[in-house]
Image (cartoon, coloured by chain):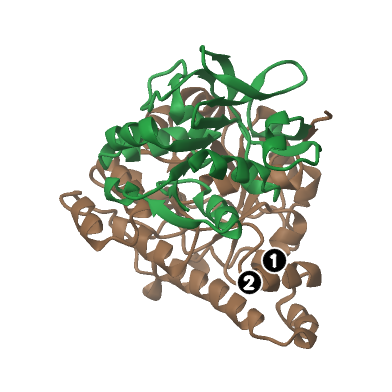
């Protein structure tokens, strides 16, 4: 009875356990406990939520391992942490302290403008962002065991999250309706590994779990993404930049479970206090958008 | 046969597809009303604290306990935690099975593993004796079992990872992820 650790099955499996749940950004132990009490299925430990990273400017890096370790001690749910795109040494550090998932994230300042991390070399699983099917399947080819559509982090505007989810799901529908002799040319067109494209075509969905992220700020936003067909949601700035984080966090968890029940959605949406102020993406200068990071 | 899967959070869709493959009619259970007319219920893998809090918030704890007194329930991983009497920390539990659970017993995600197990009880549904391939993900173990609880599988070091008490079934691992349907068939027999 030999035990095998760090296999792709085991990495992908943890993401399957997160399905139907909400993963919340937290910046300290107090936030992490509020998130766990609200029913978060995991937390993302980071020093600043995306809205603050935007406001502060400068280079955004991996968080202090000490802060991540304190959060790992404080909660029993899985703890994720972010490293910069292509920064495999930050990833090695996060793996060595035992985080449960690494987000190779465009929210931080990229360390490599041509390459992502070769994620198959790690025992810890990775989640990566995407805007379309090609990007998702390139990340899976590199070893990502979970995908999230990017949206536009730190804005509280759900429009990009919707665009990216519709694009990925629409691309998969197109792929399924294509005769198989066209798949090679399609793989070339979207820049994705042929075998992974074929597998996606057969499954009719991404071969790994697919969450939505970037701009989700209300229970209705979370339910919208679930009805569009994602497996769960990340909420970053939307909770702890709102007037009553504990109440909003609980409401978003309930809305993600009962995403198809408008009566429950109405009930949980009542009296949540101020939502995060937010920034409208359609009037945002191109150079401020972070979803374009990733290659 | 009509089997429910608790669909509050977790990998309920994976259970659903195995059950449908085996010919069961499947109902996703999110509210007490969804329990009506079911022959059995699976509580899937996921986060036990998340499921427990949602079950409390939507008035499911008592109805689930009532259901478990008369019908088969199978908990995989987080589901096994919810079925237990004791887990060594304060969280909502159904307390239906006389077992004590240790959560995250193997460490963190980097310690999650795959292993082949011997599960003699599966011979009841399939006479061909062969190992059962299992996936353990941030898995709990069953620390101890009370009287009337049968141990179905253990690791080489003796730690218990599957147990049955009458029509109640608990596994630390995830038969819904590996494509071997013998455990689901075993549970459907319990649900008859």
Residue A40: percent from left, percent from top: 41, 40
Q: Are marks 1 and 2 in contact (CB under 8 Å)?
A: yes
Q: Confirm whether residue A102 shows in the render.
A: no
Against A175, residue A221 (above or below) is above
Q: Chain of mark 2?
A: A
Residue A274: percent from left, percent from top: 21, 51
Residue annotated with mark 2 = A133
Q: How many badges with numbers are in the image?
A: 2
Seen as rendered, the residue at the extreme right is A2
Nearest to the observer: residue A245 or residue B47 = B47
Colour-to-chain, green: B
Crowding near the residue tagged with mark 2, few <14, some 14–19, many ≥20 C-alpha atoms within 10 Å: many
Residue annotated with mark 1 = A137
Whether residue B72 sits left or right of residue A132 in the image: it is left
Colour-to-chain, brown: A
State which quadrant residue A107 falls in: bottom right
Against A123, residue A144 (above or below) is below
State which quadrant residue A179 falls in: bottom right
State which quadrant residue A155 falls in: bottom left
Residue at 79% x, 36% y: name it. B131
Nearest to the observer: residue B146 or residue B50 = B146
Q: Confirm whether residue B11 shows in the render.
A: yes
Whether residue A85 sits left or right of residue A230 in the image: it is right
Q: Chain of mark 1?
A: A
Measure how far apart labels 1 and 2 are at the Cα level.
6 Å
Crowding near the residue tagged with mark 1, few <14, some 14–19, many ≥20 C-alpha atoms within 10 Å: many
Residue B28: percent from left, percent from top: 41, 54
Residue A221: percent from left, percent from top: 34, 61
């Amino acid at each position: 009875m030999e035990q095998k650790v760090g296999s792709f099955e085991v990495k992908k499996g943890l993401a399957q356990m997160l399905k139907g749940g909400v993963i919340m950004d937290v910046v300290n132990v107090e936030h992490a406990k509020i998130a766990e009490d609200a029913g978060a299925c995991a937390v993302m430990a980071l020093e600043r939520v995306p809205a603050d990273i935007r406001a502060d400017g400068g280079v955004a890096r991996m968080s202090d391992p000490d802060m991540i370790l304190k959060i790992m001690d404080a909660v029993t749910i899985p703890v994720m942490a972010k490293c910069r795109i292509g920064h495999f040494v930050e990833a090695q550090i996060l793996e060595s302290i035992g985080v449960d998932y690494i987000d190779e994230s465009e929210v931080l300042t990229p360390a490599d403008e041509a390459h992502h991390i070769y994620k198959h070399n790690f025992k810890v699983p990775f989640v990566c962002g995407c805007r379309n099917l090609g990007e998702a399947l390139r990340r899976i080819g590199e070893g990502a065991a979970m995908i999230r559509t990017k949206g536009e982090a730190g804005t509280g505007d759900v429009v990009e999250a919707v665009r990216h989810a519709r694009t990925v799901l629409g691309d998969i529908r197109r792929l399924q309706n294509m005769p198989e002799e066209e798949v090679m040319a399609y793989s070339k067109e979207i820049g994705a590994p042929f075998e992974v494209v074929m597998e996606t075509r057969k499954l009719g969905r991404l071969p790994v779990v697919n969450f939505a992220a970037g701009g989700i700020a209300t229970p209705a936003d979370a339910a919208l993404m679930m009805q569009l067909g994602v497996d769960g949601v990340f909420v970053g700035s939307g909770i702890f930049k709102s007037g009553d984080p504990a109440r909003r966090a609980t409401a978003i968890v309930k809305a993600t479970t009962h995403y198809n029940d408008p009566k429950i959605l109405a009930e949980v949406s009542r009296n949540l206090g101020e939502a995060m102020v937010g920034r409208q993406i359609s009037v945002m200068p191109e150079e401020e958008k972070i979803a374009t990071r990733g290659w | 046969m009509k089997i429910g899967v608790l669909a509050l959070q977790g990998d309920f869709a994976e259970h659903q597809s195995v059950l449908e493959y085996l010919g069961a009619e499947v109902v996703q259970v999110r509210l007490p009303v969804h329990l009506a007319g079911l022959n059995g219920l699976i509580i899937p893998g996921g986060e036990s604290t998340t499921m427990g809090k949602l079950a409390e918030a939507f008035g499911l704890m008592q109805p689930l306990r009532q259901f478990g007194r008369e019908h088969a329930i199978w908990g995989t991983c987080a589901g096994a935690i919810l079925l237990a009497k004791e887990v060594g920390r304060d969280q909502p539990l159904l307390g239906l099975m006389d077992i004590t659970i240790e959560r995250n017993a193997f460490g963190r995600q980097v310690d999650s593993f795959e292993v082949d197990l011997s599960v003699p009880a599966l011979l009841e549904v399939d006479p061909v004796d062969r190992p059962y391939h299992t996936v353990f993900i941030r898995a709990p173990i069953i620390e101890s079992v009370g009287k009337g609880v049968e141990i179905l599988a253990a690791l080489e070091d003796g730690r218990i990872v599957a147990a049955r008490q009458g029509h109640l079934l608990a596994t630390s691992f995830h038969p819904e992820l590996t494509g071997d349907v013998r455990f689901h068939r075993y549970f459907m027999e319990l649900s008859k």
